Image: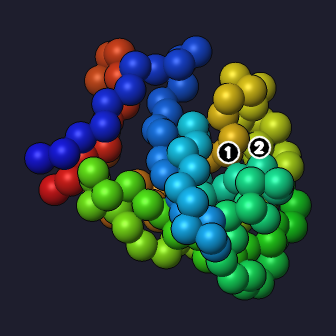
Amino acid sequence: MAEQRNTYHRGRPWLRLGFKDIEGTVHELKLIADTGSAGGIILRPDWFLKLRHERTEVRESNFGPMVSGWLRLYQPDLALVEFVRGYSSEKVAATAAHSDPEFLGVVGLPVLRLMLYGGDYDSFWLRTP
């Protein structure tokens, strides 16, 4: 069973996930894991534009309007190689970066539910079923 386990960073659960851009280059991003987020992936706008394969609709949220699009999640060690809906939000990214500037956004429940996920007193994990 493949697993990614990360010690909480400044009290925040987080994951490092790979994404393929339209040219096929893989970029690993450090994202806060937010089980309360209904957005699959919410990124800083510059990263969203770099990784987006196709634009979809604009979605209203409590952070304001968010442009959405298909992102290519590429984490073969966890068997996560598929397109997922992602969103662009400067406000969400700024909230994540407030914990640490290395955080480029949030990974939410729709993506977390593709795997088994959880946490204990000192770490958060994601693993294949």
Query: Which secondary structure, mark 2?
Result: helix
38, 53: nearer the viewer: 53
Residue 1 left/right relative to 80: left
- Identify which amino acid the numbered label 2 is placed on: Ala
Q: CA distance from mark 2 to mark 1?
A: 5 Å
Q: Residue at x 66, y 34 (%)?
A: 103
52, 6: nearer the viewer: 52
Query: Which secondary structure, mark 1?
Result: strand
Residue 66 left/right relative to 52: right
Counting residues from the start of the chain, the first of labels 2 and 1 encountered is 2
Q: Residue at x 40, y 19 (%)?
A: 7
Q: Which mark is residue 105?
A: 1
Q: Is residue 64 above or below residue 91?
A: below
Q: Residue furthest left?
A: 1
Circles 2, 1 touching at the beta carbon (< 8 Å): yes
Q: How many marks?
A: 2
Q: Residues within 10 Å of mark 2 (few under 14, many from 20)?
A: many
* Percent coordinates x, y for residue 73 in the rendering: 48, 63
Query: On the image, which quarter does residue 10 sit in?
Result: top right
Q: Residues within 10 Å of mark 1 (few under 14, many from 20)?
A: many
Q: Residue at x 27, y 51 (%)?
A: 77
**Quarter of the C terminus within the rendering:** bottom left
* Percent coordinates x, y for residue 97 in the rendering: 75, 31
Query: Looking at the image, can residue 83 be seen?
Result: yes
* Percent coordinates x, y for residue 34 in the rendering: 54, 44
Residue where numbered disc 2 is placed: 93
